Amino acid sequence: MAHILVVDDQTDICEVLKAGLETAPEFYVSCCNSGPEAIAILDEHQPDFAVVDVLIPGVAGVDVAKAAIERKIPVLFMTGDPDMARELLASQVPCIIKPFRLDYLIEQVRTHLKAGDDNLTRIHSYLASRRAPPKP
């Protein structure tokens, strides 16, 4: 089974995504609502994959992604912000735009889990070239 970490500052969204992802028999899911908590989970549990909201307060989603990439954990960004969505899509970064269907999320996680090194390379390149994030 693949351990998936979901990071979203909205608890209800996190729980819905957890329940949806766990309908796939190959996933078990941890959820958290802050960047520091996400980084602690990355350190303690070494999940196989992370689904990260880009705009979370405090330690931003991009910082969580940096921590994941340093640990060789692939990332799928999610955002509902139109400007951030355009930036991610233009950069060909693995992302999913809110709102989305849970079956599409499962499909994307499966795809990017298999992509492995390609995912890590895309996220790393994006993080290395990106401008300062907007404040949530």
Image (cartoon, rainbow, N blue to C red):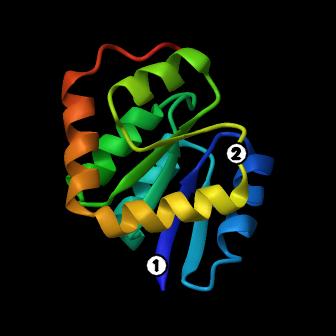
Q: Which residue is at 59% across, 64% downward?
A: 106
Q: Earlier in the sequence, mark 2 or mark 1?
A: 1
The one nearer the camera, 40 or 96, is: 96
Q: Which residue is at 71% across, 77% downward?
A: 23
Where residue 59 sits, quadrant-wise, is: top left
Q: Which residue is at 32% across, 52% downward?
A: 68
Q: In the displayed structure, does residue 116 sit left or right of residue 17? A: left
Label 1 is placed on what type of residue? Ala
Q: Which residue is label 1 attached to?
A: 2
Q: Which residue is label 2 attached to?
A: 100
Estimate the x, y position of residue 121 in percent, counting from the top left: 19, 47
Where residue 124 sits, quadrant-wise, is: top left
Mark in the foreground, 2 or 1: 2
Report the Cα–Cα distance between label 2 and label 1.
22 Å
Label 2 is placed on what type of residue? Phe
The one nearer the camera, 93 or 32, is: 93
